[in-house]
Image (cartoon, coloured by chain):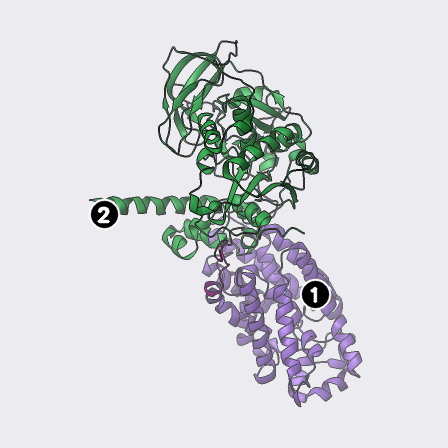
Amino acid sequence: MIKSFRGGIHPNDNKSFTANKAIEIAQLPSKVIIPVRQHIGAPCDPVVAKGDLVKKGQVIASSAAFVSSPVHASLSGVVTDVAQYPHPVFGKCLSVVIENDGLDEWIDGIPVQRDWDKFDGNEIKAIIKEAGIVGMGGATFPTHVKLSPPKEKNIDTLIINAAECEPFLTADHRMMLEYSERILTGVKIVIKVIGVQKVFIGIEDNKPDAVIAMQKAAEGTTVEVVAIPTKYPQGAEKMLIKVLAGREVPSGSLPMDVGVVVQNIGTIVAIEDAVVRGIPLIQRVTTISGSAIKEPKNLLLRIGTTFEDAIENCGGFIEKPAKIIMGGPMMGFAQSNLKIPIIKGVSGILGLSKKDINTGVQSPCIRCGKCLTVCPCGLNPSMLSILGEKDMYEEAKFEQNLFDCAECGSCVYVCPAKRNIVQYIRYSKMRNTADAAKKKEALAK
Amino acid sequence: MSEIKLQENLFTISTSPHIRAEASISKIMWSVSAALTPAALFAIYHFGFPALTVILAGSLSAVLFEYIVQKLRKKPITISDGSAFLTGLLLSMCLPPSIPAYMAVIGSFIAIVVAKHSMGGLGYNIFNPAHIGRAALMVSWPVAMTTWTSLSGKVDAVASATPLNILKQQGYSKLIETFGSSHQMYKDMFVGFRNGSIGETSTILLLIGGIYLIYKGYVNWVVPVFMIGTVGVLTWVCGPTGMFTGDPLFHIMAGGLIIGAFFMATDMVTIPITKKGQIVFAIGAGALTVLIRLKGGYPEGVCYSILLMNAVVPLIDRLMKPVKFGARG
C-alpha cells in the first residue's frame, strides 16, 4: 500500500476530453514567434538578424551562461523580425519571428540515427544542453543543470514524474501510451548520466492504460513503474518524492538534498530525441482542451506556434471562453489574448467556459479550516490570506511560513468563501522580496 | 511589434488556480439549518404552538436585524447566505418554550447586532452569537429563562423542572423517581419527552442532524466526540458518592450538551482552525460544563463553557499551528 502525502484535493480531472485521442501532428503555422527566454536562468541573445534565412533545428539564440538553454528555429524560413513580443509567462520578451517557407528543411547534420550507448555521461549532458532541453512540466529549469548535481549530494534515486495531476492535461498520458519504448530509452540515458540504482516512474492510477504500457516497456529492467493514488498536487516534486521514495525534502531544500533527481515525461521524450536522433527541442506534445474548444486534441506542436494557430487546429471555439490558460487550470497562467506563442514549458492550452471555472464573489474567511486540511505544505492559508489582505506580509513571512507555499491552489479550490488566497500569498511574497532588495541596496550604499 | 490594443477583445486574466469547487458559505449554513430541522419539528410537536412562535420570532428577526445592520453599514446584503437565519434558529432552540416571543427577538438583536456585526460581521465575531444572545437573556430575565412550565400533557411527570434542575435541587434518587425508573429516564431523554429548552430535548434527532453534518464535511467529528466524551468521563469519575459512581449517560443526554457539542462548539467562526486546536477546545468546553454542572450554581453549563472557550481561541490558534512540510526533514 502506497502512503500518500498529507492534504491535497480531488478536482474533477476532466481528462476524458482528450485522454483517448492519439497525438496529432499539427499543421505547420505560417509563422512562429520564438522568445529567446523559455527557461529559468540567463536569457539568450539572438544570433540571427532580420532577413536571415534559417533552417529547422538551427540555433537562433544562445548564451554562454551555464544556467541557460539555447533556442532553435522550429521552422525553415525567413527571420522577419527580432523584437519584443508577448510572452505567456513574462508578459513581453525579445523574440525571433520566422515566416514559414513551406519547405520544412532541417539544418545539415540532423536528424541522424545513432547508438546512444557510445556516449559517456558528460557527452550526453553536452548534447542535452546543445539541444535546448528544459523541464517540460512547466518549470522550464535547464535539464543539463538538473543532471549535474554537486558530487557531495550522493544521488541514488531517479523519479520520472508522470503523475500529470493537473485536470484536463493528457499530453504525458498520451506520450506514455504512444512513445513508451522511447521513454524507456530516455530513462536509460538519464540513468547513465547520473548513475542511480533506484528508478521510479510514478503514474497516477487514473491512467491505468499508461501504467500497463509503461510496465510492459520496463519489463526486465530495474525501472519500477508505480501506480499511485490520484490526488492533486501529486506532480509537485516534493510530494512525489515523499510518496515514491518516502523522503521529505526539508523546507528550503532541493530534491537533490535527499538524493533524488526528478524528470518529467516530456523532458525524457525530448532527451531521447536529442541523444538518439540529434533533434533539438523544437516541438512538444501539448493538450488543447476545455469546454470552449470545439474539438479538444493532443497536438504535436512546433515551439513558437501561436495559441491562435494551435486552437485553429482544433476547430476553434464553440463559445467565447471565459478564460484562456497556458498550462493546467490549477497552476497555469491566464492569457489575455491568443497572439501568445507556445514555449517549451506549455503542457496545455485551455479554453475554459464559465461552467468550468465556477468563480464566485470573495467574502470574509469563516475559518472553516478546509484550506488547512488540504494544504500539502502544512500551512495556514486562511491566516496567510488575511495577513496579505491587511498588508502584514512580514508577519506572514516570519510567523506563518509564507515562503514554504508552493502556490498549488488547493486552498483556493476548496474555499467556500471564494477567497483568492494564492493571490494574497503571491502579493505578500513580492512585497517581502521587494523589501529585501531595498535593504540590500541600502546596505550597498 | 504587434502592440495589443485595449479595444481588442481580451480574455479575463487572474492568478491561478482557475477552477474552484462548488462549496459555498450559503450551502454550509443552510445545511446546518436543515440538520436542525428534525429536532425543531419535534420541539413544535412536543411543546406545541409556543415553541413554533419562539422559533419563528427568533430566526426571522435575526434575518431582519442582519438586513438592517448591513443596510446601515452600507455593506452588501448577505441575508440569503443563511448565517443570520441559522443564528436565530440556534438561539431559539436554546430558549425555554414558555418564553415570550419578544424576548426571543431581543435575544436575536443581541446575537446579530452586538455579538456579530459590532465585531465586523460574518467571520469576525469572537463569541458564538447565539450563545451570547442566550447569555444576555439569562442575565436580563433570569426568571423567564429558568421557568419550565409544563406545556403539554406529555411532560406532566417532569412539569416545571428540567432533569438537571431536579438533579441539582433534589438529588439523583428523586430524579429517577420522577421518571419512574432509570430505564424510563434514559428512554425519555433519548427520544426527547422531557422538559428543557426548545431544541435540546431529543437526543436522537440531534444526533441524526449532527452525523449528517459530519458526513457532509461541515463538522469535524473531533469536536462533538471529544466534548461529549470529556463530559461522560468526568461525570462518571466525579460521581456523587465517590469516584466512578456518576451517571455519564444521563449527563450526556441532559441539558444542552448534544445540541451544544454538535451545533455550537462546531461553529467554524468561533472555534480553533486546526484539528489539534479543536480537540483542546472541545475538551476544555466539556470540562467546564462538568465543573459548572457539578460545582457551580447553575444546573447547566454548556452555554457558558463554550463562550469561555471561545475567548481563548486566538491563544489556542497561536499555540497550535500546523506542522509545515519539510519541517522534520
Magenta region: B318-328
- In this view, A141 is above or below A429: above
Q: Position of residue B294 (x, y in %)?
A: 61, 83
Q: For the residue carrying disc 1, how many other residues have a C-alpha within 10 Å: few (<14), some (14-19), or many (20+)? A: many
Which residue does the image show at 70% across and 87% down from the upper left? Answer: B172
> Would you say B237 lies left or right of B127 here?
right
Q: Determine the chain carrying the residue at label 1.
A: B
Front residue (pair A206, B204)? A206
Q: Which residue in the structure is indicated by mark 2? A: A443
Chief secondary structure of the magenta span?
loop
- Rendered location of residue A297, percent (x, y): 63, 25
Residue lying at the far left of the rendered structure: A445
Q: What SS does tag 1 mark?
A: helix
For the C terminus of chain A, the quadrant is top left
Residue B206 shows which numbered tag?
A: 1
Question: Percent position (x, y) of residue A439?
Answer: 27, 47
Residue type beneath disc 2 = Leu
Report the Cα–Cα distance between label 2 and label 1: 64 Å
- Decide whether residue B324 is among the magenta residues: yes
- Chain under label 2? A
Quadrant of the rendered structure where residue A273 is? top right
Q: What amino acid is at disc 1? A: Leu
Q: Position of residue B296 (x, y in %)?
A: 56, 83
Same chain, marks 2 and 1? Answer: no
In the rendered image of the structure, the colour used to display chain A is green
Q: Do we see residue B6 in this rendering?
A: no
